[in-house]
Amino acid sequence: MQRLLTFVLAKLIGLYINILSYLAPQKATRLAYKFFSEPRDGRLLKDSLPSVLREAEAKMVTHNDFIFQTYTWKGTNDCKVLLVHGWESNASRWKLFITYLKKAGCTIIALDAPAHGLSSGTEFNIPQYAEFIDVLVRQQKPQYMVGHSLGGATALYYQSHYPDNSIEKMVIMGAPCDFNSILNNYIGLLSLNGNVFKLLNKHFLENLKIKTDEFSGSLFASKIKIKGLIAHDVNDKTVAFKEGKKIAAAWPTADFVQTKGLGHSMHDDKLYTRIYSFLFDGK
């Protein structure tokens, strides 16, 4: 019943936006972008953080008009790894993986994305997330970065747009490749018309400097020179397996790991062992 209600509500919202696109295009654009960019889940409350985050050293970092939350698990050596979560998630999604990283004695750093966890803002977009990452990378100088889902897509964008940094190796898990595939999924979910699609494209170009046809993980990956490991599950129902293959095909210094049965979350002992080996054993 809940699925049916959600489906009907999405279609009614889409119908309303479609009508507005002819009568009040600016309002239609605002609404369409709001539903596209505002996460419905992933927020945290400061007084009830998950246990894995309570174990970390928490720090809020100010960047322009935003505040983003960071977490640090101190290690015993000079190695540092940065973890970048995805859509409607937060830094606690790394709980299982952190147990593996601690074996290496490295310092582990994670952050909450814009409008996620304890970070400020109401909307998520990749360029802003990349700015947060850049501030943290320049402060902490991690050698390794691991990104999941849209966090992986942001890591690709970051490394291609901010190449002069300390990152030596990158791991990308379950990441989407083409921005248009994400946008088209949203358009389909709400049954938005072509007029709304044009309005959104205009908004992305004018406000975020994003040309949706050119905003592609494969394009970003083709510019990356460091070593990479890309993992994607054939049963991923959130981000199609072919998206990961596209990224892998464009990144000549990256290896591709195909998994089965992990879905989109990709929590798995065997995969985490493979990532550990790639980061710390050079395999």
Image: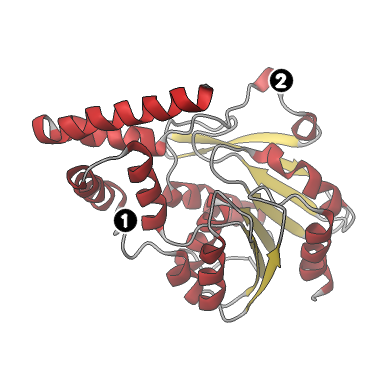
Say which residue appears at 54% left-offset and 42% top-offset.
87
Amino acid type, residue under disc 1 in the picture: Ile
Say whether disc 1 or disc 2 marks the residue closer to the N-terminus. Answer: 2
Q: Quadrant of residue 68?
A: top right
Quadrant (top left/top right/bottom left/bottom right) for the C terminus: bottom right
- Could you tell me residue 212's position as x and y percent? 31, 58
Can residue 223 be seen from the camera position used here? no
Q: Residue at x 46, y 68 (%)?
A: 220
Q: Is residue 210 left or right of residue 75?
A: left
Q: Residue furthest left?
A: 23
Residue 263 pos. (x, y %): 66, 51
Identify the residue under disc 1. 210
Q: What residue did someone put label 2 on?
A: 48
Q: Nearer the viewer, residue 106 or 281?
A: 281
In this view of the protein, can residue 219 be seen by the observer?
yes
Q: Residue 176 location, x and y as percent?
A: 50, 57
Classed neighbour count for the residue bearing mark 1: other residues with Cα under 10 Å, few (<14), some (14–19), many (≥20):
some
The three-letter amino acid code for the residue at tag 2 is Ser
Asked where in the image residue 93 lies, by quadrant, the reply is top right
In the image, is residue 92 above or below residue 166? Answer: above
